[in-house]
Image: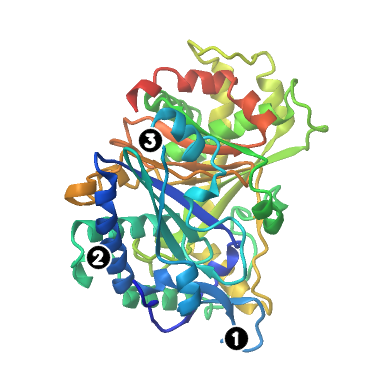
Amino acid sequence: MACPPFFDPYVLTELDHTLPPVHVSGFLTFRLKEPINAIPVLEAAVARLVHLLPFLGGNVASSTRIPGKTNVLEVQPPSESFWSQYPMLAVKKHDLSIDPGLASSVVSDDVSNETFLPIGYEFTGVDPVWRFQANLMLDGVIVSFSLNHQALDGVGAMCVIDAFAKCCQNPNIDAGSLPTSPEKQSKSRTTISDLANVSQTAGASENGSPMEVASHSVDIDELNQNAHSPVSKKLVLNGERIKLLRKTCAEQAQPSDQGTSVSGNTIVTAILWICLIRAQFGPHATAPPPPELSSAAMVSNLRSKIRPALPMTYLGNTVGHAWSSFSVEQVLSSISHLHYDSRAAAYLDPQYMRIVAAAANRLQDAVQSISDHSVRDIISEKNAADDWAAQPTIADLHVSSLRQFDLYALDFGSLLGGVSDFDMPESRFPGLAWVLPSRGKPQFAPWEVRLTLHPEVMERIQKDPLLRWLSSDVMSKL
């Protein structure tokens, strides 16, 4: 890949401009007897991927293509010097093994080691759309990737990984065998922009705005520069017990909610939310007096909400946020009799089930309130603005889910085989959680959640009886 890719520059959509400038990174771990043999396979696969989807090798930079607008962004081909500085695939050798101890320091709990990443956390103003790094270990390869969240969302990232796997299988794969193409991406961007031409009144939906509930603004530059003060932990939750809580929520739903199934993602978000409120503001917390309300936001995939619907293989941002709030005092008082414990809980107090059900039903209402109408409002409001800069806000808890993506079933070819482990470590944004892809059939497999919090809050939340109950008897199944 000596020459940089070429393609026609394109302006990012209105929805892309709602996302802050952050890099999102992930790790694909392959266990191999001869790791060095993987490098030619990876080089050929990445070269083919960029040949067929050249915009992945591009940069996000300022644009002047829309007169009268400021802070507009576009994807443009990289210069030769930039391509040389940030190649599509970097290779680094580490005299380390892929073992549990290493996982804790590289792709797990203390993920601050940028030597394993192709792109650092800080933004420069001209930043790559996507880059890979092959980390050669003594007993395998950890393929890391970093993507620009202003150009792709989580579903888009999973689609790229799918395409990458196909290129690893066959470095001569034809364009029609990939899940998408530049032409299909352009068509979807046009669909989004066309929605801005339909005049809508920006604001709340019929059920109240799901977009701004007890949220607060966030300084992205400060978080990118101070990447290592929070801590990141992977929680593994019992799938059968999550199903039990779903059943409890269905039984306690209001009559108006009957027939609306609360999803597993909603249950997991509710669990984290209630435990976080206790850890932040409970009797052992050192925080200032608690606020009246706590907020939680579930990331919603808008591809199916928009009319006409966008294909699931669209890579760009179609991220909506289902916002909800809960009385902090109501949570604390309802479970004040429960105490933190480092031991696994044998049963769950019924009152805990009730408060989780109440939170889950609130969240599900917020998810249901996002519609084609509210998405058009967002697009139209951004399109009408003179300044397209993102105005990011964040809830106390922000949850994105990749649970349904069948990553562990992907075939990366005869040499690499399947992924032995996948993780998306994050140590910048306290309150951010990723629900990771399922290792088996989603209805049975344990739930893996990557959670970032301040250290003292993380220490308390891990002792919560609800999480202790959900975490028992699951680690041995991974």
Query: Looking at the image, is 133 positioned above or below residue 292?
Result: below
Mark 3: amino acid: Ile
Residue occupying the point 66% across, 70% down: 389
Q: Do residues under tags 2 and 3 come within 8 Å of each other at their CB atoms?
A: no
Position in image of residue 347 (x %, y %): 49, 12
Position in image of residue 113 (x %, y %): 54, 45
The quarter of the rendered structure image containing the N terminus is: bottom left
Residue 212's quadrant in the figure?
A: bottom right
Q: Can residue 66 be seen at all in this image of the molecule?
A: yes
Q: Give whichever of discs 3 and 1 has the lower sequence position.
A: 1
- Left or right position of 286 against 458: right
Question: Which-is-in-front pick, marks 3 and 1?
Answer: 3
Q: Which mark identifies residue 178?
A: 2
Which sits in the foreground, 187 or 12?
Answer: 12
Q: Give whichever of discs 2 and 3 has the lower sequence position.
A: 3
Q: Give the CA distance from mark 2 to mark 3.
A: 31 Å
Question: Which-is-in-front pick, marks 2 and 3?
Answer: 3
Q: Which mark identifies residue 98?
A: 3
For mark 3, give the secondary structure. Answer: loop
**Would you name the residue on which mark 1 appears?**
64
Position in image of residue 284 (x %, y %): 74, 21
Residue occupying the point 48% across, 79% down: 79
Badge 2 crowding class, 10 Å Cα cut-off, few under 14, some 14 to 19, many 20 or more, is: many
Residue occupying the point 52% across, 61% down: 149
Badge 3 crowding class, 10 Å Cα cut-off, few under 14, some 14 to 19, many 20 or more, is: some
